[in-house]
Structures are given as C-alpha cells and as structure tokens.
Image (spheres, helix red, strand yellow):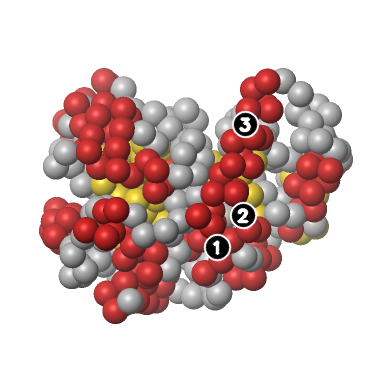
C-alpha cells in the first residue's frame, strides 16, 4: 500500500472515530438561543428565502423537480449541472425557471465537466454554486456580466479568504461528515470557526451530516447563517434516485456512512461517503486495494433501461429503472443519514425541518 493511501485510510479511521465525540461547542455555549439567528435572517433577506435551508446540487440526482420543490417551499433548491452538455444545461435551467418563480442555484464541481456553465448563465440561472475549487477569471467575468450571484463550497479558512477576495456572495463550509464526494479533510465542527473568521461579513452555510431540524439549529447556533444539505434531499420523492437507494437511506444508522476511496472510476482518489454495502465490504476485506486489483472489478452489477452496463466500482449511484444488484452500487450518504426515516415530498421535508429547528 502506498504511503498516500495509508495516510488516507488512517485519516478515514480517525474521522469515523471522531463522529461520536461532538459536544456543545464554545460558540454554541455563547450564542443566543433566539431563532432564527440574526445571521440566518440576513441570509434569508439576501436571497429572498423563508428559511436558511439550501439543497445541494447533486449532478443528475438533483433534477428541476427537486430544485423547484425546495425553492417553492422557501429554501434554496439547486440543479446539478456537472457533466451536462450546454444544450442540456440550458434546457434544465429553463425547466426549473418554469417550475418556480423563486431563486434557485445551479451547481458545478470545478474539477469535473463544467461545459454547460456559460449556457446556464445565459439561460438566466439566478445563482451559481461551485465546489472543489474557485471559479476562473473568465467564469467570474461571465457571472458579473449577467449579474448572477455565486457561492462556493470550501473546506478551510484559506479557501474562504480566497473566495471573499473574489467577491463571493456566500460560502459553504463542508466537513468530512458530508455525503457524496468530500473535499473536506476535517470535521465541520473543526473547520467552521476558521471559515467564519475568514469569511468576515460574507454569510457561511454549514454542510455535512445535517439531516434534522435539531442539527440545523445547532449549526445556526455555531454561527452558520444557514445549512446546505444533500443526503436528506436524496430521500425525497423528487430526487432522481432508485427506490432501493432511497429506502436504504431510511434504514441506515450514522455508522453505515463510510468515508472511503472505494468507488473510483475516472475521478481517482477523491474521497467520498457512501452507505456500507457488499462492494465496500469485499474491498475492505481484500485490504482496500487500488483500482486494477479490486475484487469483482469489471463485473456488471446493474443495467440501465437503455442497456448501459454499470460496473461494480462505478461512481454512479442507482437511478430509477436500473435493474440488477443495485444495492451494490455507490449509495452516497453523509453521517446525518441516521436521522432520515422516510421518503417524502421535498417541500414537506423543508417545512418539517424548519419547524423542528424553530421549536427544538
Ligand atoms: C448524492 C450526493 C451527490 C452529491 N453531488 C454533488 C455535486 O454534484 N456537486 C457538489 O458540489 N456537491 C455534491 N455533493 C456534496 C454536497 O455538496 C454537500 O457537501 C453534502 O451533501 C453535505 O453533506 P450531507 O450529504 O451530509 O448533507 C453531493 C452529495 C450527495 C449526498
């Protein structure tokens, strides 16, 4: 095993061990209990929201139906446009605009395919939200030209400071509790104070492992102006995911969310959080070997309705209509999965979470 891989796996072990250690932070102890906090109110006013709940753009898994439902309920919905062609990006923005008159975001993972970026801005995407890097000068020029607001997900105070220098409208602080691909290397609790300090007056959202009203309340009391949630919104009627995946989210415990590098194809060495399943168990039992040496590599685990074969370690999660051993595919999930117990319409989730946050 290379020293890089060993270091990663040691970190992953520490992260897992650290999960249960979260206590009341110093900031929580000092913060007033009044809800919404002043920072949350300012964020809601800035974006015209009824609650400071942002939905993560999750590539193809976050379609216009989901984004519009979240935005119509008063949160900020997002469509995931990473990997979309310019034509498709334009079409998805138009569909979302037709389904909501409220603001929404489009999301891009900057180290992946962002070829629809210009088309999405030209089509009138109200907000662009980036992750895994900072937008280029050219992208910033396009945003400024169209008067489009933008936000970025970071994992350190340094990332936040650089985003502030570029004129960012909001910052998302991701911790290693997050589902999907994880750019963070430390827990949210550890990272949030330095991101808040570097962000100065720019609003900061907390992301990673937040899936209940109580967790939102804690994040706001820790100084976040709002939250960004991915995993909770996968267990909604509108998320573009297979029912087997959604059902697995409603049964899982926090410990079933594993920080790993098991599922990599194309996007190598990007850590991620997934639900423990047979593929992960086999890989761990074999000593976590690198691509090329993983058990069952090359096996077809599922087939799409159009006949596309999904291989065991693919970075694709089960989608509607897929058949086969879909539960052996990557099922992205953060540690907040332990508080998800149902699949419901996204609007109901937003309303329920916010009521729970206010009344917790
Ligand atoms: C299913 C899934 C897909 C994701 N896809 C993306 C993505 O395309 N772009 C992105 O910036 N973040 C993506 N993320 C990460 C989110 O931005 C966010 O950091 C994460 O969802 C927060 O943690 P949580 O899932 O515990 O709420 C994804 C997360 C999940 C769960």
In the image, what residue occupies the spot 70% across and 39% down? 262
* Residue 71 screen position, x and y as percent: 30, 63
* Residue 344 screen position, x and y as percent: 49, 75
Q: Regarding mark 1 in the picture, which secondary structure is present there?
A: helix
Q: Is mark 2 within 8 Å of ligand 1?
A: yes
Q: Which residue is mark 1?
A: 337
- Note whether residue 202 is visible: yes
Q: Regarding mark 3 in the picture, which secondary structure is present there?
A: helix
Q: Earlier in the sequence, mark 2 or mark 3?
A: 3
Q: Which residue is mark 3?
A: 8
In the picture provided, is 15 more to the left or to the right than 129? right
Position of the C terminus, as image quadrant, is bottom left
Q: Are marks 2 and 1 in contact (CB under 8 Å)?
A: yes
Q: Report the front residue among 8 and 154.
A: 8
In the picture provided, is 132 more to the left or to the right than 223? right
Crowding at dot 2, Cα within 10 Å, few <14 / some 14-19 / many 20+, comes out as: many
In the picture provided, is 200 more to the left or to the right than 247? left
């Amino acid at each position: 095993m290379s020293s890089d891989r060993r270091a990663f796996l040691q970190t992953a072990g520490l992260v897992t061990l650290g999960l249960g250690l979260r206590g009341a932070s110093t900031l929580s102890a000092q913060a007033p209990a009044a809800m919404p906090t002043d920072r949350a109110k300012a964020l809601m006013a800035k974006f015209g929201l009824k609650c400071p709940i942002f939905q993560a753009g999750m590539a193809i898994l976050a379609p216009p139906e989901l984004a519009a439902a979240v935005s119509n309920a008063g949160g900020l919905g997002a469509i995931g446009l990473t990997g979309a062609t310019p034509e498709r990006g334009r079409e998805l923005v138009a569909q979302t605009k037709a389904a909501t008159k409220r603001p929404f975001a489009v999301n891009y993972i900057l180290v992946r395919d962002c070829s629809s970026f210009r088309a999405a801005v030209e089509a009138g995407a109200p907000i662009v939200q980036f992750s895994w890097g900072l937008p280029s000068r050219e992208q910033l020029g396009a945003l400024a030209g169209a008067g489009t607001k933008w936000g970025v997900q970071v994992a350190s105070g340094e990332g936040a400071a650089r985003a502030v220098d570029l004129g960012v409208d909001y910052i998302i602080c991701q911790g290693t509790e997050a589902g999907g691909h994880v750019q963070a290397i430390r827990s949210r609790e550890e990272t949030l104070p330095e991101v808040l300090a570097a962000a100065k007056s720019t609003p900061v959202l907390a992301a990673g492992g937040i899936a209940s009203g109580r967790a939102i309340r804690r994040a706001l009391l820790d100084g976040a102006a709002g939250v960004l949630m991915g995993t909770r919104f996968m267990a909604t009627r509108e998320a573009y995911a297979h029912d087997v995946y959604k059902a697995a989210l409603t049964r899982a415990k926090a410990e079933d969310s594993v920080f790993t590098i098991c599922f990599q194809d194309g996007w190598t060495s990007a850590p991620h959080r997934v639900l423990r399943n047979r593929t992960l168990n086999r890989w761990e039992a074999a000593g976590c070997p690198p691509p090329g040496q993983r058990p069952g590599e090359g096996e077809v685990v599922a087939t799409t309705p159009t006949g596309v074969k999904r291989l065991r370690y693919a970075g694709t999660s089960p989608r509607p209509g897929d058949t086969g051993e879909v539960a052996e595919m990557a099922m992205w999930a953060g540690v907040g999965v332990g508080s998800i117990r149902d699949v419901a319409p996204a609007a109901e989730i937003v309303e329920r979470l916010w009521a729970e946050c206010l009344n917790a």
